[in-house]
Image (tube, grey):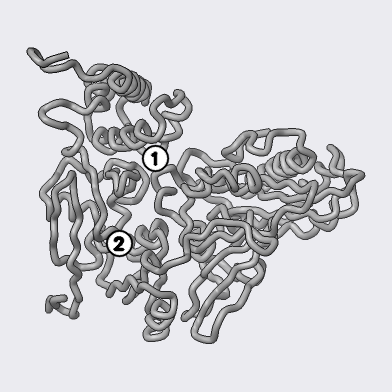
Amino acid sequence: MTTQTTQTTQTTHKVTLTINGQPYTAEVEPRLLLVHFIREVAGLTGTHIGCDTTSCGACTVLVNGVPAKSCTLLAVQVDGAEIRTVEGLEQDGKLHPVQDGFVQEHGLQCGFCTPGMMLTAVALLERNPQPTEDEIRRAISGNLCRCTGYVNIVKSIQYAAKQMREAQATPAPAPVGAEV
Amino acid sequence: MIPDRFEYYAPTTLAEAINLLQQHPDETKVMAGGQSLIPLMKFRLATPGYVVDLRNVPHLDVLQERDGSLIIGAMVREARLESSALIRQRYPALLDTSSVVADPIVRNFATVGGNLAHADPANDHPAMMVALRATLLAQGADGQRTIPIDDFLVDTLETSLKPDEVLVEIRVPQPAPRSGAAYCKLERKVGDYAIAAVAASVTLDENGACTQAGLALTNVGPKAIRASAAESFLTGKPLNDETIREAAKLAAEAAEPGSDLRGPADYKRAMVRTLAARALRRAAQRATGSIAHNGNIGGGVA
């Protein structure tokens, strides 16, 4: 523990978060919000700050696989957690099916809600590979979009669900030249 | 928005948590999921000097039936109730309630215990627990005590917990045969507090007469209101259109709504009447098994 001397003495805490597989450790004030840790300590600005009042869900990230509003958690409160942000969705240069779905089905206009919306969708599809439209709409009801009217967002998630189910059903093609 | 400075503790035992509370009893807030406390601290409506986070205290996440009660540990998250087969099958009214608290993302961290201990009259669990006649187990330096929900809820944002006490668990009586309960909430949109909501619980005898009734109201007064006159009226009577209508009228008379952005007082009182009738009807249907126990989750419209 170190102390920082300003007007009052404030104890800081050593917090380690694994964000998209990479550990980040910092001495932080208890009042540092998770979203500020992600954006300012880790430098990952894909997680947006929207309303800052627990309403809009723009700052949604996955904390140990579960969607959370990162403006409403203290970094110290989730010390040791695995965090996933939008930067962690793309793997090996390939978009996550949910990202692909948002592209294919025009699931965004201004894009501000999109990172949070996609992470909520990823968590939904990991838990429920074949959600009904109603289940999708319930799942994203804590993420506000002021552009799309949600129709294309729902389609994007349905697109991703289909892609993910098909990928599960069909094993990846063997590399060219490999023994079959 | 950034909270004011505070010192943060995450004790690993209940004794340690209580000890921390004793050091600065008037400047310390207990934090469960933080989904009400952190917003208040960001707005600086709450500026505690010390925060005691219960996340590392063991055994506070119990969710099981024991000794005639459903035990809900103080750190049980709302989402856990929603995914629990026990809750779905045996306590569908708690599912009604949990599934309309804030929004699904908030519910991943928000706790039932926090919802009660925060004692916001707009919160959903207090009225349900009043209707179900829950008791709360608190632990402090002087030991444990159980507090009936009516004594626990004192006023707006005020409970009878002492500054050095921690809410440990909530005890909901196991439903007697032919019992049913329901929670009906009217909200403008997902994530908003209730315009009004009503919790109902009934137990019927073999002939269909009501032997015990619980009826309580959300966000139409300084705290969750028990509609005592309506409860007394129903006791000993069959639940039919006529008795439900009269009980709903008495429930509306018990409401103390104010006019605000969610509507004028008269409108809210009218909604209490409608919601009370719906909640009683659904509770009666569940008591008689005439709907599936998990029917119509979400506290919606009958």
The image quadrant of residue B241 is: top right
- Identify the residue position indicated by label 2 in the image: A77
- Give me the residue at 33% from left, 75% from top: B50
Q: Is residue A127 left or right of residue A175?
A: right
The image quadrant of residue B149 is: bottom right
- Circles 1 and 2, Cβ within 8 Å, touching? The answer is no
How far apart, in angstroms, are the residues tagged by discs 1 and 2? 21 Å
Q: Amino acid at mark 1?
A: Gly
- Give me the residue at 66% from left, 42% from top: B271
**Residue B124 pos. (x, y %):** 56, 52
As rendered, which of A28 and B191 lies closer to the eye? A28
Q: Which mark is residue B248?
A: none
Q: Is residue B120 left or right of residue A68?
A: right
**Residue A81 pos. (x, y %):** 26, 54
Mark 1 vs 2, N-terminal side: 2
Where disc 2 sits, the SS reads helix
Whether labels 1 and 2 share one chain:
yes
Q: Residue furthest left?
A: A177
- Give me the residue at 63% from left, 43% from top: B89
Q: Which mark is residue A142?
A: 1
**Residue B260 pos. (x, y %):** 53, 50
Say if residue B99 shows up in the picture.
yes
Q: Amino acid at mark 2?
A: Gln
As rendered, which of B7 and B270 lies closer to the eye? B7
